Amino acid sequence: MAGVTSERALSWERIRKTADKLTTPLLPDDYLTLLNPLWSSRELRGRVEQVIPETDDAATLVIRPGWGWHYDHRPGQFVGIGVQIDGRFHWRSYSVSSPPKKSGRTLSITVRAMPEGFLSSHLVNGLEPGTIVRLATPSGDFVLPDPPPAKSLFLVGGSGITPVMAMLRTLDRRGTMSDVVVHYASTTPERMIFRDELVTLHEKHPSLTVHQWFSDEQGIFELAQLDAVVPDWRKRETWACGPAPMLDAIDGHWKAADLEDRLHLERFSLQLGGDGGEGGTVSFQNSLKEIEVDGATTVLEAGEQAGVGMPYGCRVGICHTCTVTKISGTVRDLRSGDDYDQPNEQVQTCVTVPVGACVLDI
Amino acid sequence: MAIADVAEYLHLTPEDVEEIGREFDAIRERVERARGEKDAAYIRRVIKTQRWMAAAARIGMIVSAPLDAKARRPIVAASAATLGFAKILENMEIGHNVMHGQWDWMNDPEIHSSSWEWDTAQPAEQWKHSHNYIHHQFTNVLGVDNDIGYGVLRMAREQKWHPVYLGQPVFNALLAGLFQWGVALHDLDLEAIRKGKKDPKEMKRQLKQIGLKGRNQAFKDYVLYPALSGKQWKSTIKANATANFMRNLWAYMIIFCGHFPDGALHFTEEELDEETRAEWYLRQILGTANFEGGKLLHIMSGNLGYQIEHHLFPDLVSNHYAEISPEVRALCERYGIPYTSGPLHRQYGQVLRTVMKLSLPNKFTQDDRPPTGPEVTIGHGRKLQEDRQERRRELGAWSRTERSPA
């Protein structure tokens, strides 16, 4: 089967390659999008099919991706989404809340409008079905293994439910729901996203336990109470997603119990795992500019400080909009600590810092 | 005659010059802030229209092939014209402006100066160097801006006469008809090649790039689409040649009307010494000419009828030039800066007169330009990169690919 598909894909590729000669210097896709905006694999894109309100301030966007999208994200991963506001594309990343489905035609992301979040408010309140958005391939390590562990625990705060929901839906779809405890905190019942669906899932799968916690009434959930609520938490593989202070507390608690390898955290901000670089002089060859920066300044920030018109997108290493060719020198990826020292290498400027002098092709 | 110091030529005090600079900066900032959804919709609409036109023209030629001659001819003629207009629109309002970075603010990878490739023989990368940088930064500086005659014509009295220029009216006609190929060779710097100053490795790289792009362009227009038209291949070749010819002629005329009418002045290299941003603005105005016309004419010219506004703000969206033009003009009047404009036919008439006159030695003809300064005679040749000023950011970027690893 796989052979047939790849052969078919190959001949389809060949047709497109031949058609290139007809449309040069453009691609056939550039003309096909005149007929249907989704008929292009030049850039990943999708059309918003539905905006489903979940709570007063949260909504699920059902997106139909265009060509080139593989429905093989792992449950828990996030996607980059680029939305045009006032003529300009803005990028953010959100967890996919729908389960991966090879035969799928849509994917869903669930977004809560943050008071300060100009893009999230737009997504929840301003997005019309039919809008074309840009997409970046799914990524992230906050994922559920298949088969799932025998015993697991999900600690969720607020809109942190979205990646967890993708995992629970996957367990439901695959019929592999094991002994799962979800501890889900929200300010009020009204603001609790997917509350009804969680109840339904529990009714369907008795091995799934859902604890709801409403912090407006019950106060902040203290981890000291965990022993009472989930007595066997130490024996469970744990996934936690929510606001940063909650994750910090959980991280500390698990570390104190010496169980950190059983804990998976999802933070929606750039985690600078690797050591910073040494800093150095970054030269922008075509702009004829250079700047001396320290090891905590990303190449993107260096370019912006030097006044170079750097391309940028999500600024957290997801969307690859900021990728530029590094002609020489070494840069370090802040997420992994890996060094990139090959000449003429593509580097993501928003998550790399210079290690000594380097030259960029911009 | 050429200007060695813009401020002195315009009798402006250093304070005036800086104030003018500030006023232009203010216009730039205002347009930058005003860019938004309407502008994004505009460029998308233009691109969509252009692609529909191109597709319709190509399909028209193919589907009309089996029809009898009486039905076929008008379809092919309409297709040829539509394709010509599509190529014009693509080269002028879309390609030229996108490659200047006018639409980079949208952060849209599909409409971005770094990735746009246009429907002409010149590779985008070479265009961005010869045009965005060399021409826009060194506008009308003798011996530095290669657009003064493109290394083929003598378009300034300061350029040394040679008997070969007697053929200039013929060269001019050839350049007009084959403009896309002339432009394709532009970044090679023919003058430098003639003088043996060109780096052979770089020349080989550029020629390869031009060859590849040119081959794809020619193959599409003269092999592939004719082949798809079956028995009518000859008529498709003719139609495509006509479309290319239309575009060549039009692009040539618009570009020549930007810097060769009588009001567009030349500068000596002294002007570049310690030239401030405000003085650069003044040089752009003095060295450039507008032409007047309706909205459609301006769109089909890539808004280069507002060549002065374009030269002041090369990376601002072209659909705003019309609106800032009266303001630029009023500012020029207030400070007594000449602002050259006129109907297209008059501007082109002046260009043609200069082409004819300068085919002869200076002593046989009279200068039509306003007197500007001392008589000078210059050789020709582009300066080496290290001798040049730092590039101005607002011109639009350029880059070189295929570097051998260090």
Image (cartoon, coloured by chain):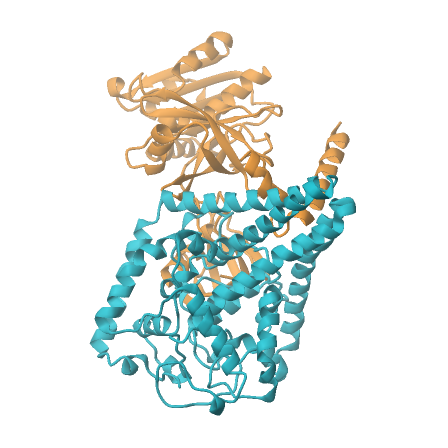
Q: From this viewpoint, which residue is outermost toward the front? A: B70
Give how far across and how far down residue B120 sits, in percent.
60, 59
| Left or right: residue B242 compared with residue A61 | right
Q: Which quarter of the picture shows residue A17?
A: top right
Q: Nearer the viewer, residue A308 or B33?
A: B33
What is the quadrant of the C terminus of chain B in the image? bottom right
Q: Nearer the viewer, residue A170 or A336?
A: A170
Residue at 24% x, 72% y is B18
Give how far across and how far down residue A284 sits, in percent.
47, 64
Q: Is residue A288 visible?
A: no
Q: Is residue B258 above or below residue B27?
A: below
Count of numbered marks: 0
Q: From this viewpoint, which residue is outermost toward the right? A: B231
Q: Nearer the viewer, residue B233 or A6?
A: B233
Looking at the colours in the rendered structure, which chain would you say is drawn in cyan? Answer: B
Looking at the colours in the rendered structure, which chain would you say is drawn in orange? Answer: A
Give how far across and how far down residue B82 sits, in percent.
57, 48
What is the quadrant of the N terminus of chain B in the image? bottom left
Q: Nearer the viewer, residue B22 or A217?
A: B22
Q: Is residue A266 above or below residue B283?
A: above
Q: Is residue B150 visible?
A: yes
